[in-house]
Image (tube, rainbow, N blue to C red):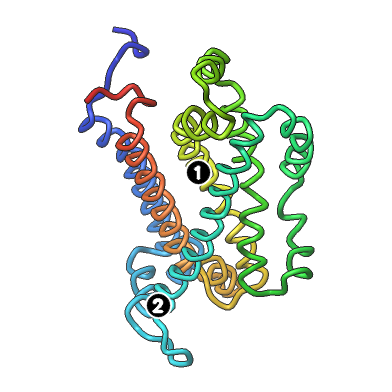
Amino acid sequence: MRWINQRIGRGNSLLMGIAPILILIIVYLIFAADRHAINPADKILPLPGQMVDAMRALVIEPDPLSGRYLFWADTLASLQRLGLGLAISTLSALLVGLVLGILPPVRATFGMLVTGIAVIPPIALLPILFIAFGLGETAKVALIVIGIAPFMIRDIAGHVGSLPREQIVKAQTLGASTWQLILRVALPQAMPRLLQAVRLSLGPAWVFLISAEAIAADIGLGYRIFLVRRYLAMDVILPYVAWIALLAAVTDFLLVRSSHRLFGWAHGDRH
């Protein structure tokens, strides 16, 4: 049987997905053990015990100065910024994308503007955002929104604009108004695409969040990573990076499950 025709069961798919991760961990442990055999004080590839010891102080011991559990405080701060940025971007993409996609005059007027904003490197706007909004939370959230909202808007607008013309004509024949076309025809078909756009934007959103926290923050996952890098504290950096990857993977999994549960018809699911 050709590989392209093979179907992988859920259990086998899970095992096959875990295998590369286990291989990477084993390779890391081999290289780390080899480096520590040569230099026990090596900081570049810390052993698991060293990472556990370093993280214990951040996870279960309160900070002497602030009294906060720094790991959980960093996580909460970053997730709040990320969640707010994603929420604003998602709402903007839904509202603006629907209007741009369904109304040709609006698309002709504002489509070029959205495209122009989308191609600007968001990191280049970071100094402007800090000048305009200060060093508080607003600038960090704004960077996420500017970084991913234009892409999401273009994606939703393109999807809505490519809906079969027959659907629009039939709805108008039955007496549908413009708002009814948006709410009854375009919106239901845009929702699965919207969740897909959020999934694709997760990676860039984390990049913009970490960048903003690294430059101007006093708490957050990105702030902590860039704070300890001056001490070559890889025993903290690596667990933090792994934690960010886990949070992103869980979020992606929840979005996939939500999309299949709410919009199974868009994925060809049979119930």
Residue 260, image x, y percentages: 33, 34
Work out how far the residue at label 1 is from the one at label 2, CA to CA, in angstroms.
31 Å
Which of the two discs, 1 and 2, sits closer to the camera? 1
Which residue is depicted at the point 50% across and 35% down?
A: 183
- The C terminus lies in which quarter of the figure? top left
Spot the residue most to the bottom.
65
Q: Is residue 206 visible?
A: no
Which residue is depicted at the point 66% across and 43% down?
A: 150
User: Toward which corner of the image does residue 269 lie, by quadrant?
Assistant: top left
Residue 237, image x, y percentages: 49, 65
Instruction: Count residues near mark 1 (Cα–Cα under 10 Å), then give few for <14, some for 14-19, many for 20+.
Output: many
Q: Amino acid type of disc 2?
A: Leu
* Image disc number at residue 249: none
Helix, strand or loop at label 2? It is: helix
* Image disc number at residue 58: 2
**Is residue 108 depicted above or below 242 in this figure?**
above
> What residue is disc 1 on?
198
**Is residue 40 depicted above or below 57 in this figure?**
above
Residue 264 or residue 181, whichever sits in front: 181
